[in-house]
Image (tube, rainbow, N blue to C red):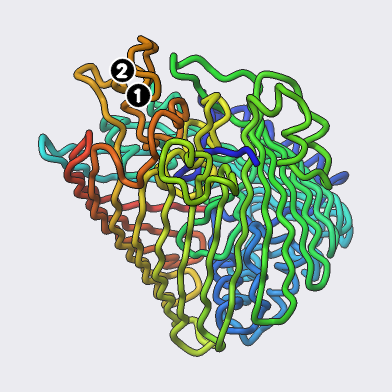
Amino acid sequence: MQTNGSKALSVATRNGSTSFAIAVLAVVFGIVCSRVAQAQSADVNAERVSMDMMLLGTIDGTRSAGAAAVWPQSMYELTKASSDSSDAFARYINAYYGPAILTSAQTDGMEFASTSNGRFRGLSLNDGTARFQADAALMIRPGVTSDDVMSEFFFLLRPSLRFFGSLGNNFGYFLDLSNGAKVAGTSSRIAKADPTLSRITKFNIEDSAFFDRYVGYIQYQSEWLRVRFGREAIQFGFSPIDNLVHSVNAPLLDGLLIDVPYKAFRFTMTHSGANGTDTAGSAVPTKYIATHRLAIDPTHWLSIGVNDMIVYWGRGVDFAYLNPLAFYVSAGLNTEERNTNDNSLLGFDVAVRPVDGTMVYASLLIDDLSYSTLSDTSWQGNNNKFAYQLGATQVIGDRNSSFRSLATLEYARLDPFVYSHRSMNASYSTFNASVGYDMQPNSDRVALQWRTWFTPRTSIRIDFDYTRHGDNILDSTGNIVMGEDPRYPGSGAMQPIGNVGGDMLRGDGDFLQGNTFLRGNMSTQRRVQLWFSAEWFSNIFTDVRVGYTNRTGGNTPDSFGFASFEIRVGY
């Protein structure tokens, strides 16, 4: 089996700034389209209550163990969830989505600047067949960053528009447009405090004063089928902290999603365009990432999933990988080009709820496997690259109360060169960030997360983690050390001997010497972050974020702290 890949962080964006005037025109267009299109899914970018409710339900036993393993959930699932009037989280979802809920009451035509379920809505319509809603929001975020050299104030401003609609219960669309401005501060420092901004080329790399983001898709959905084309956050896995295959915090991908949940089974596939650069900084042409997930919940307390992934580039859409029933590892071995350039990976995960309120989960990702060299510690054993994840999470508090807590302890390890690939352009990444777990290869991490909900939309979250990482060995110019191939002394062949597998974007040189875990210039990182989020009044949200990171050793020792206060009015 041949495989390889790459890793990630937060939610991302595109280049350029979306004109606010265009956004207004888009809303007008959405009003027209609302007569011919339909229902969205949970909006994880603006509200996490639905995700929190599903997660708590899988742990406390009110839902099957795998109910929250694929995100986002459809409006069918939200409609069912919101029907439980005894659950504070369900009541919030019912009020938040209002006319979009499939069982909601009809309106008297198109309503402008109306209030329903205690929430203000810009435009809303539900005539029994067509549903439509349009809203605006304004975010203001002052903050400060500090390191060993200086402290700096920053100030961000971001207006946004969102509209979605439906026709019947099956056809739908969703679009969220935002156009932000950096009033004060240095982009690279702000991006370290908000990883979602680090994925915006114009903001982080070009140091532009403007930044934008959009989420948008059209889709068909029913109780047992969802076919979506567009851009939306995706998650595969059981961990409340992060996941190996698809992370909800990764840069957003544009593409096709097919999701088939049926009783105890669930099949999900994606085929998306990705963005990448080669070692010279040039854009990788036509890079694609495709994934499959097949899961089964044989009992209410057990869920098992199998994932396979492929990364390919330099050609158009490959129909062998567009096949929902293809096995990517086998398809990738069919031709010389695929075998050489494409990067296939395989993953397994399981979650067990031994008692209601407690869940234990584990994941294994295989990025290259050779049975004959599994125990070989020389360079010949380098064709075996794995990632591991093991965690336990515990719910504290009564399931019918909004005051609840969730504690999660997790260990994750990525072997050298995991997520990378020898052709480098085929790393499991987009915007130079991982699609999966937020950690570089040749690293391991112990993470602890504590969350407490005071109301469904008021919570505090504290994250602690300790990470060890083997950095690549660099020369005085910051490039990987080159030298004679150690396998062929005297040959004069120069190879990247300083590459110890510590960068998902550099997979070359993985067979030069034994890939000992944490080999290289080792660093240790300690990080603590606090996030308090609240909705004090309907449509008025605040977020306080404070964080500190201390990294010693390695190529870039650093101490960095930040604090920010965000207020958002609208949605």
Instruction: Classify mark 2: helix, strand or loop.
Output: strand
Mark 2 and mark 1 residues within 8 Å of each other at the beta carbon: yes
With 436 as the anchor, is 411 left or right in this view? left
What amino acid is found at the position of numbered circle 1 in the picture? Pro
Please tell me which residue is depicted at 36% across the width and 48% down the height of the picture: 443
Q: Nearer the viewer, mark 2 or mark 1?
A: 1
Q: Few, some or many C-alpha atoms within 10 Å of disc 1 (few <14, some 14-19, many ≥20)?
A: some
The quarter of the rendered structure image containing the C terminus is bottom right
Q: Few, some or many C-alpha atoms within 10 Å of disc 2 (few <14, some 14-19, many ≥20)?
A: few
- Among the 4 quarters of the image, the one containing residue 59: bottom right
In front: 109, or 448? 448
Q: Position of residue 281 (x, y in %)?
A: 45, 16
In front: 382, or 551? 382
What amino acid is found at the position of numbered circle 2 in the picture? Gly
With 108 as the anchor, is 571 left or right in this view? left
Residue to which mark 1 is pinned: 486
Please tell me which residue is depicted at 53% across the width and 66% down the height of the picture: 362
Q: Position of residue 188 (x, y in %)?
A: 30, 31
Residue to which mark 2 is pinned: 483
Q: Position of residue 284 (x, y in %)?
A: 57, 20
Q: Is residue 105 visible?
A: no
